[in-house]
Image: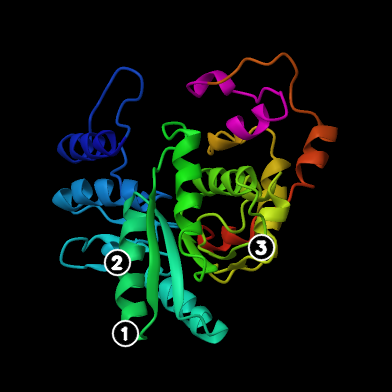
Amino acid sequence: MAVDFIKGSISNIDDINDYDNCSKGHKKKIISGVVGAASSVTSIQVANLLRLFKIPQVSFFSTSPELSNKQRFEYFSRTIPSDHYQVKAIVDIVQKLGWSYISIIYEESNYGIKAFEELDDLLSKHSICIAVKEKLVKDSGVAETIAYDNIVLKLLTKPRAKGVIIFGSDQEVAEVMKAVRRQNVTGVFSWIGSDGWSARNLVSDGNEAEVEGTLSVQSAGKPSDWIRRLFSSILDVINDKRNPWFVKFWENFQCKYPHHRNIPVTIDYSRNVSRPQRSSAKAIRLEDQLQFVSVR
């Protein structure tokens, strides 16, 4: 996708006043910048490519400290704080709880590895020892059940370390909690969660007893009345051709949107969007984190 952006931008610069049979004299637009991605891994890959062509990039959810390196990522910006501050907050919590011997589970990704490196360094400076260090396979579809069981069994080899920091994503952490239940050790550990999983339903659904008492760290978020008003007003515009994502949104309600055939990869549902469906759509709950993607 990033390559497509670049190719299109270069093509438009070279041929800004391109004439064709369909739209004579139509000026093609040059790409001013790219918004995204959500994950740090993807943002790093995209940023490495976009910087070669001096195309700005703004991410709303990539938190890796690596992206703060302006010598490498001079055209990258973000609207969310770096994990550096999340790590500091977690260490503050550990100190406040009086823990001096803890375990860390982190996912095998840029998000998890960079956070672990900072945690390891900061905990050492505060004379806090790490009992167990375990990696989570990033793709829970690849890891077998026994891999998660082994992580829990490893934690149990250090019974004095009751506090466990988990820096990972919701799918993988959900599997850890299932392993805790399988090993019949629910309530044995006290968890401190990162923003990658601690507020996600996927982890808590079915694992309520296992995650009870978890302390989590999240970037400060608050409901945005402005976004809700904007969203509601756009839903009233039934022929909005500007935003292709609303076509995908309405497919969740098994409705088709006018001009939907102009958007690739859509499902051709039989019923059109109606007023009752628009009213029910306005009742959806918006995540507080949407403040990181809002621009006024």
The answer to whether one can see residue 3 in this image is yes
- Identify residue type, mark 1: Lys
Circle 1 Cα neighbour tier, 10 Å, few/some/many (<14 / 14–19 / ≥20): few
Q: Give the residue drawn at x 65%, y 32%.
A: 239
Instruction: State yes or no: residue 250 in magenta.
Output: yes
Q: Which residue is label 1 attached to?
A: 125
- Which residues are the magenta region? 247-265
Q: What residue is at 48 percent from the left and 78 percent from the top? A: 89
From the viewer's perspective, tell me whether residue 99 is left or right of residue 112. Answer: right
Vertical relation: 183 (above or below) 246: below
Which label number is shown at residue 117? 2
- Name the disc covering residue 226, or none: 3
Query: Residue farthest to the right?
Result: 276
C-alpha span from label 3 to label 1: 43 Å
Between the C-alphas of marks 2 and 1, the distance is: 13 Å
The one of 278 and 186 positioned closer to us in this rendering: 186
SS class, disc 3: helix
